[in-house]
Image (cartoon, rainbow, N blue to C red):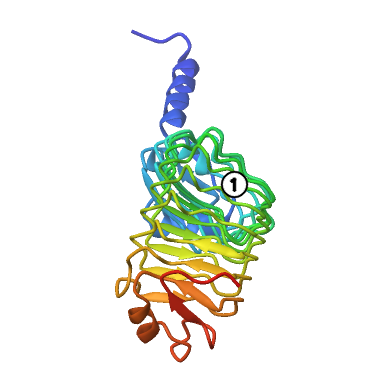
Amino acid sequence: MKFRYPFLVLYFALAVQAGLAQNTYVPDDNFEQALIDLGYDDVLDDYVLTANISGVTSLDVEAKEISDLTGIEDFTALTNLHCATNQLTSLDVSANTALTILKCYSNQLTSLDVSANTALTELHCYANHPLTSLDVSSNVLLTYLSVRDNSLTSLDVSNNTALTSLNCYGNELTSLDLSNNTALTSLTCFSNQLTSLDVSSNTALTNLDCSRNDLTSLDVSANTALTTLKCYSNSLDILDVSNNTALTNLECNNNSLTYLNMKNGITDALTYFVATNNSLTCIETLDPDYATANWTYANGNIDEGVEFSVVCAPE
């Protein structure tokens, strides 16, 4: 049997072959070299065989001096991407819808769109000056979010009800609504511009660091699971930790405290305690004898002349 149009047969054969050998464009030499080092490519020619990367589930290209991650869109099975400490100014992960963990910290991202990445459980995008905004409203499965050391002026986590850990310190936040984040166990929001902080809904918190803000009050009566409370360098004048019976670390120094209630039954379990640089003359505790012997000016716990009593007389 003879084919009347042999050139058509050749054309289709070549088309099939081309389809089987589809390539992905990778213009950044440092990115392609990283893929070569990982065994996904063999020649530095701006192209990688798509079949070699389409099934990859985890990719670590940290600290490779990459400035362009074009080509990442064909890593369609990717669940874990670690591209931190590079020179990225933009990052398009809209095609990587299977991502559950994204680590893109310590780059130069000015924006980050994760609206298509609804499977994300961890997002590490800290230290990306000048990242000024971030929308995580679509990422309802997030349990860990670290946006520290950016330039964020606002952060809406109202949809992120699964969050257990939130690191947002070193930004320019003036407010933070955590009323929906009842699963939070760790919150570090120090070095912002917060004037108030309501953690009454966050009863699972074990770690709270809200230091270096502009707080004038702080109610932690509902946070009975707290083991660490750092609220130093604010403008607090009253602090009551009598309900916080699990505390092991309390740092409330550099405030304007005139009243500190520590009648929580804790003595030797409190392994770190600092209340210096306040206006305290007396601190309330259930065991003044232990406090007097162990929490001293000489040890750096209190200011000179501060006394302990079960009930401090009003000044």
Q: Percent x, y for residue 117?
A: 50, 36
Q: Relative to the observer, which residue lies in front, 94 or 277?
A: 277
Between 17 and 312, the residue placed more toward the observer is 312
Q: Disc 1 residue type?
A: Leu
Quickly name the residue at label 1. 91
Name which residue lies at 33% across and 68% down.
266
Relative height, residue 194 to residue 269 (above, below) = above
State the residue lying farthest toward the left. 268
> Which of 203 and 312 lies nearest the eye of the viewer?
312
Which x, y percent locates residue 114? 55, 39
Note whether 270 is above or below 89 in the view shown: below
Q: Where is residue 309 in the image (x, y as percent from the top left)?
A: 43, 75
Mark 1 crowdedness (10 Å alpha carbons): few <14, some 14-19, many ≥20: some
Give the residue displayed 60% in from the left and 76% down from the top: 278
Report if residue 60 is visible in the image: yes
Residue at 65% across / 55% down in the picture?
194
Pick the residue in front: 255 or 61.
255
Whether residue 43 is visible:
no
Q: Is 69 positioned to the left or the right of 245 in the image?
A: right
Q: What quarter of the picture does the N terminus occupy?
A: top left
In the image: residue 170, left or right of residue 295: right
Horizontal relation, residue 306 to residue 59: left or right: right
Residue 274 coordinates in the image, percent (x, y) = 48, 77
Instruction: Classify residue 268 by image quadrant.
Output: bottom left
- SS state under label 1: loop
